[in-house]
Image (cartoon, helix red, strand yellow):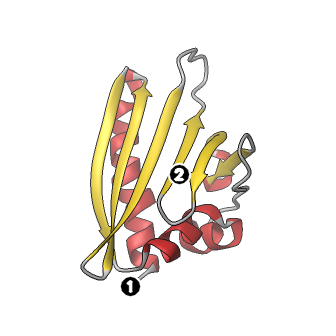
Amino acid sequence: MKTIRQKHYISATPEEVYTALTNPFTIELWTGYKAEMSTETGSEFSLFDGDIVGKNLEFKEKEWIKQQWYFDGEVEESIVTIYLKPEKGNTRIELIHENVPDEVYQEMEDGWRKNYWGSLKQFFK
C-alpha cells in the first residue's frame, strides 16, 4: 500500500472548487460522466460513471473533503482527503490518498493528475 500526495492550483475560489467537487450536477459538467454525490456523512458516491465509488466520511464546507474509496478485494481502507486553501486569488488543493494498492498506484497517481485535477482546471478556465 502506498500514499499519493499532490498539490494543485485551480483558478477559482475554495467555495467554487468545493461545489465542483460535491455537487453531482457540477461534477457531471467537468467530468462528462454521470455522478452520484451528496455531502451527507456516510453517503455513498459514484464518479466517472461508476469507475470511482466509495463513502463520504466528513466534510467542512469550502475547506476539506474526506472519503473512503473502494478497491475490489481490498480490506484496508483507502482514505482520500482533499484540502482547499485560498492562495493569491486561486485555490491550492492538497490531496492525500492513503492505502492505495501497489498494483494500481501509478494508474491512480496519473488519474488524479490528468483526469481529476486536469479536467477541473479546464472547467475553471
Looking at the image, how many numbered discs can be counted on the residues?
2
Q: Is residue 40 above or below residue 44?
A: below
Of residue 52 and residue 79, the one placed in the foreground of this image is 79
Q: Is residue 59 above or below residue 77?
A: below
Q: Amino acid at mark 1?
A: Lys
Quarter where residue 7 is shown: bottom left
- The residue located at (45%, 44%) in the rendering is 81
Look at the numbered disc 2 and give the secondary structure of its residue.
Answer: strand
Residue 95: x and y, percent?
Answer: 37, 48
* Viewport quadrant of the C terminus: bottom left
Which x, y percent locates residue 44? 73, 43
Disc 1 packing (10 Å; few <14; some 14–19; many ≥20): few
Foreground of the two, 94 or 4 = 94
Residue at 44 percent across and 51 percent down: it is: 82
Q: Amino acid at mark 2?
A: Ile
Disc 2 crowd rating (10 Å Cα; few below 14, some 14-19, many 20+) is many
- Between the C-alphas of marks 1 and 2, the distance is 23 Å
Left or right of 91, for residue 45: right
Which image quarter: residue 39? bottom right
Give the quadrant of the N terminus: top left
Q: Which residue is mark 1?
A: 125
Query: Is 44 in front, or is 118?
Result: 44
Lower sequence index among marks 1 and 2? 2
- Label 1 residue SS: loop
Query: Which residue bears the numbered disc 2?
Result: 65
Residue drawn at x 41%, y 31% is: 98
Near-viewer residue (61 or 10): 61
Asked if 89 appears above or below 52 in the picture, the reply is: below
Above or below, comparing residue 114 to residue 51 in the picture: below
Q: Position of residue 123 (x, y in %)?
A: 46, 78
Percent position of residue 109, x then y: 34, 42
